[in-house]
Amino acid sequence: MKVVVAGTGYVGLITGVVLAYIGNKVVCIDVDQEKIKLLRQGKSSIYEKDLDKYLLLAKDNLTFTTDNSCYKDSDVIIIGVGTPERQDGSANLDYVYDVCNNIIKYANKDMVVVIKSTVPIGTNDEVEKYLSSKRKDIKLTVVSNPEFLSQGSAIHDTLYASRIIVGAVDDNAFKVMRELYEPLLKEPYNVPYLEMNRRSAEMVKYASNDFLALKISYINEIANLCNKVGANIDEVTKGMSYDKRIGSLFLKPGIGYGGSCFPKDTKALHWLSKINDCELTLVKACIEINKKQKLILFNKLREDFNYSLKGKKITILGLTFKPMTDDLREAPSLVNIDMLLDYDADITVYDPIALDKVKKIYNNKIKYANTIDEAIKNSDAVLIMTEWAEIKNYNIDNYTKYMKYANIYDGRNCYDPVIMKNKGINYYSIGR
Ligand SMILES: NC(=O)c1ccc[n+]([C@@H]2O[C@H](COP(=O)([O-])OP(=O)(O)OC[C@H]3O[C@@H](n4cnc5c(N)ncnc54)[C@H](O)[C@@H]3O)[C@@H](O)[C@H]2O)c1
């Protein structure tokens, strides 16, 4: 099948690579010239495990372009562009409609247009109406096919997907989609495949993401209460996880969720519920809890230093919103850097992957270290924002060796509090 994937970000690129790997002829298009230039050289534009390997494996079936005429002659067009939040929390669909306008311009036969971007319920219907109003001569059928990959394990999550959800209103569209994904439905992948109506498919995506965000916020609140009442969240979550209805995943307390999905998808669903006069108050609470949680370390630090951080050397370890990705979108580290800057702290940061990206945001307002040792030297306090393996496995004796005062505020519970205490470290973590 000839497939065009619009957008070579975390979703579009992985989708394009995997579809090419399983035998389709794929063209990936992006408006970002730099990304396409890199990809044409076989270099990945994002940090993602195994991506380089699969780019190579799929190379005979895969091309990259910025030329919109690539939509001509395609069987399937997959839209994987961003749908960022607007000021009011709603999803911005401008990029989706930009792609639609290019399809309208270049489509020359009946095609299936797949919306993989996360879009509010009803968008697929609206997009189909729009496309058919502009191109009455051909049939442009719209299919909802939301994406569930996690950054950091995106290739694996696509090949061995938890499920493929396909929402359509047309038998032929269902047939084309089944054909597209056929290899993944068989050994060794055996991906569960679910067909449903388009609005349900759109809702599966939001309901799933918002549920996970709720789970995180719930356990963060329980952890905060553990801190107050002398319980230990590690023991509590272990005890909870033996109940199969609860499970053990997404029960890890921390400094709040970030990334390009949970923050905007909670806001977008909340916005949609409000305009439909059916407000999701749980989701609203989750958004508020998360906002507060991101500053929990900063607030404790500020209190411990009597609200005076001017000139104090504060080190931040880990900048990305989670390990194994270079993504900084909505990362708790950024809010904390902003607050520390407001308080005139002397900030040094370290991250194994994202330093260059952070430099572009803060330039010379903060300092950048190339190793953990260098970052913590003479530091008054360390804030841990991302649980990179390198940080978790760091020799904790170095904290007392290199820091001016060994004050560690750990937002990801990387170390054992008892061991830290025995080493003479002033250690604050979440819910323990
Ligand atoms: N990142 C994730 O983990 C994830 C997971 C599931 C779903 N999603 C959803 O998938 C969508 C894409 O997310 P992402 O993280 O990949 O975004 P991204 O910002 O990483 O990538 C979007 C890409 O689209 C390109 N683009 C914009 N306009 C274009 C156009 N007219 N034609 C071609 N390319 C264009 C941009 O240049 C960019 O490279 C969003 O709706 C997101 O909510 C993301």
Image (spheres, rainbow, N blue to C red):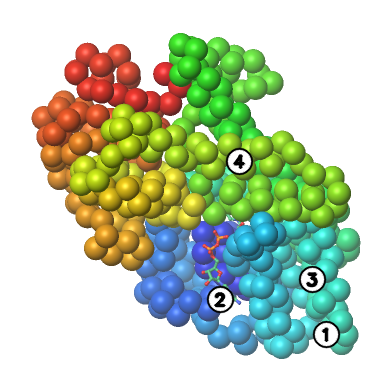
Percent x, y of residue 320: 40, 49
Q: Residues within 10 Å of mark 2 (few under 14, many from 20)?
A: many
**Type of amino acid at the residue the image marks with label 3:** Val
Percent x, y of residue 202: 76, 53
Identify the residue under disc 2.
Answer: 29
**83 and 339: which one is in front?**
339
Who comes first in sequence, dot 4 or dot 3? 3
Can you tell which of label 4 and label 3 is closer to the viewer? Answer: 4
The answer for how far apart the CA atoms under marks 4 and 3 are is 32 Å
Q: Is residue 206 left or right of residue 394?
A: right
**Type of amino acid at the residue the image marks with label 2:** Ile
**213 and 303: which one is in front?**
303
Q: Residues within 10 Å of mark 4 (few under 14, many from 20)?
A: few
Identify the residue under disc 1.
Answer: 134
Q: Residue at x 33, y 37 (%)?
A: 307
**Are the residues tagged 4 and 1 within 8 Å (C-beta)?**
no
Q: Which mark is residue 288?
A: 4
The quadrant of the image that shows the N terminus is bottom right
**Type of amino acid at the residue the image marks with label 1:** Lys
Identify the residue under disc 3.
Answer: 127
- The quadrant in which residue 209 appears is top right
- Badge 4 residue CB within 8 Å of ligand 1: no
